[in-house]
Amino acid sequence: MLMDFTAEYKEKLRTPKEAVSIVKSGDWIDYTSSLGKPVLLDRALAERKEELYDVKIRGNLIDGPIAVAECDESKEHFVYHSWHCSSYERKLCDKGLCYYIPMVFHNNAAYYEFFLKVNVVMVSVAPMDRHGYFNFSVNTGVAAPITRIADIVIVEVNENMPKVHGGYDECIHISEVDYIVEGEHEPFSYGKLIKPTEIDRKISEKIVPYLVDGSTLQLGIGSMPNALGELIAESDLKDLGMHTELCSDAFLSLYKSGKLTNKRKSIDRGKGVFGCAIGSAELFEWLEDNHGVAAYPLEYVNRPSIIAQIDNMVSINSCVAVDLYGQVAAESAGARQISGTGGQLDFLIGASASRGGKAFICMSSTYKDKEGRMHSRICPQFNGDIITSPRSQVYFLATEYGIINLEGRSTWERAEGLISIAHPDFREKLIQEAEERKIWRRSNKK
């Protein structure tokens, strides 16, 4: 006979206002990540602004609005922080209403376990099942380690959250929950799919020949991965696998084309592994109750030693700029925070150590500023920019003009290779800059 959790559920049920009444001035609150944002609790907490001071909140990849951040420009009452900025959180940073927390995702659980304080965690979950479990859904990547160390755990039941199968830590039992909040939620706003550009397609066309049957993929988010997904779907490749921090619509495209089977994976055979998911309504429909996918904490998904066990692991990420020494800036433009380190460094290290593995960092060769002036993404040398991936860890770099491999290359080989994939309009100037830094040889071979 199954246990009946009805009485316990009713005992722990609170209104949002009642639940947030336990928050005290000076507390650290955690909203976890993405769809895990506690919408009702966030609004209720913001309403307590005048009676609370120095309440600090952490989140990441959360879409707006975040009421506690927007209601207090003084940051006297609420101070919001993000591990990895969504486009919305980036705008909060621009306004001075969000502080970024530097990190690498495979260490996220350890940060909480050994170094951080969480007085209250507030997390959205799927409705409880008959065994008393609430599913963390596409928030599995980060949620469980935070709830384990929190003094008080409040779950907000969101009827729109898909229930996702997991490897471990994809659920929390009612016995580990202090308060439960219910209420009506608006359907998730998924936004428009980012359409690939012509440059995205050109870069993708150069990457596809590096893939082999049975490759396992990690893809970042954005138009370039979507372009790659489209090209792979049209290719002759077969039996591809998924082991990715972020599951996006690119993987759904691969599945629909019959390319994504996970049959040849060295570990988690038959399962597409991910930590979190951002994408369309159709993507979440695919993930729900799908035994072909498994959500894991990022301490597993992003751990380089785990990634290295997967034969033919291919990691594909993007960046903002790279300098002639091979340093990569992927999370900021100058000092302006755009996103976060995330898992780029994790997968660079892990895929490089995989048998047959490859790690790509991709970018368009140029960008235009607000005045319409064109600039090279390959610059002479960073000066104050935030480095996401050190030159010692960078593997393949790709633009629409080609792909180069920086592993084991000297400073002049790096400069030579990078200039070869820069936009032609900027190559002569970059050669001059390389010569001044004494990292250029080709000009001496006349």
Image (cartoon, helix red, strand yellow):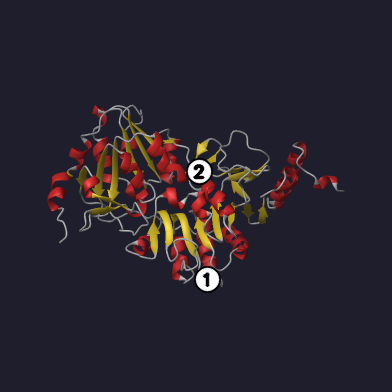
Q: Would residue 141 be found to the left or right of residue 177 on screen? A: right
In the current view of this chain or complex, which residue is farthest to the left?
A: 7
Residue drawn at 16 percent across, 60 percent down = 2
* Residue 318 visible in the displayed image: no
Q: Residues within 10 Å of mark 1 (few under 14, many from 20)?
A: many
Mark 2 element type:
loop
Spot occupied by residue 183 in the image (x, y as percentages of width and height): 20, 49
* Badge 2 amino acid: Thr
- Would you identify the image quadrant in which residue 76 lies? top left
Question: Which residue is identified by label 1?
Answer: 238
Q: Residue 309 versus residue 126: which sits nearer the camera? A: 309
Spot occupied by residue 375 in the image (x, y as percentages of width and height): 63, 45
Spot occupied by residue 264 in the image (x, y as percentages of width and height): 50, 67
Residue drawn at 46 percent across, 46 percent down = 106
Q: Would residue 79 be found to the left or right of residue 107 on screen? A: left
Label 1 or label 2, whichever comes before in sequence order: 1
In the current view of this chain or complex, which residue is farthest to the right?
A: 446
* Badge 1 amino acid: Lys
Spot occupied by residue 105 in the image (x, y as percentages of width and height): 46, 45
Q: Quadrant of the N terminus?
A: bottom left
* Residue 129 visible in the displayed image: yes
Q: Would residue 197 be found to the left or right of residue 70 on screen? A: right
**Number of numbered discs overlaid on the protein picture:** 2
- Would you identify the image quadrant in which residue 27 lies? top left
Question: Which residue is identified by label 2?
Answer: 341
- Would you identify the image quadrant in which residue 167 lies? bottom left
Q: Residue 303 versus residue 208: which sits nearer the camera? A: 303
